[in-house]
Image (cartoon, helix red, strand yellow):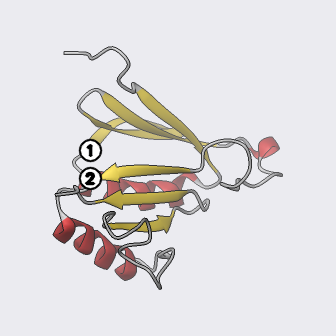
């Protein structure tokens, strides 16, 4: 059943598709997404009625790198199952040598009631995985 207003999909152009697929594939599958579409310039993963698409940026548009503090998308935040799930993802990120943001205040960088891990994708898009507030 489709819910009016529910996000249909997000499409992100990336500087290196293979690197982004390696990064996002394991994370999205850990969060319950499944591979949805695949073609030479892109790949997508789906969870229920929403999917995320990653497309290789054309060479002619790679001259200006992405920065989350410019106008546009700042970050993507995902629900985790629990605090333990946030901890598992944090360990997996560290095993993959992914840069954890705000290490001095992790896992409460968003405040004492906000248990989450913040990190960056290969293009430095900020990603957050947050535990339910129970």
* Residue 42: image location, x then y, percent: 51, 39
Q: Quadrant of residue 86?
A: bottom left
Point 81% across, 51% down: residue: 64
Query: In front: 4, or 32?
Result: 4
- In the rendered structure, the answer to whether residue 1 lies left or right of residue 119 reads left
| SS type, badge 2 | helix
- Residue 77's x, y, as percent? 41, 51
Q: Residues within 10 Å of mark 2 (few under 14, many from 20)?
A: some
- In three-dimensional space, the C-alpha distance between marks 1 and 2, rounded to whole angstroms, equals 5 Å
Q: Crowdedness of circle 1 by 10 Å Cα count: few (<14), some, many (20+)?
A: some
**Given the current orientation, which residue lies at the most extreme front position?**
112
Disc 1 is placed on an element classified as: loop
Relative to 96, does residue 75 appear above or below in the rendering? above
Disc 1 marks which residue? 33
Quarter of the rendering containing residue 8: top left
Residue 29 numbered tag: 2
């Amino acid at each position: 059943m489709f819910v009016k207003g529910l996000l249909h999909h997000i499409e992100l152009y990336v500087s290196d598709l293979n690197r982004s697929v390696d990064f996002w594939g394991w994370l999205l599958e850990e969060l319950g997404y499944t591979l949805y579409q695949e073609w030479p310039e892109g790949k997508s993963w789906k969870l229920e009625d929403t999917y995320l698409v990653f497309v290789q940026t054309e060479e002619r548009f790679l001259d200006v790198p992405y920065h989350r503090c410019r106008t546009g998308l700042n970050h993507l935040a995902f629900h985790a199952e629990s605090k333990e799930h946030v901890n598992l993802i944090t360990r997996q990120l560290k095993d993959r040598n992914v840069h954890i943001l705000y290490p001095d205040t992790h896992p409460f960088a968003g405040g004492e009631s906000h248990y989450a891990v913040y990190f960056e994708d290969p293009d430095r898009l900020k990603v957050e995985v947050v535990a339910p507030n129970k």
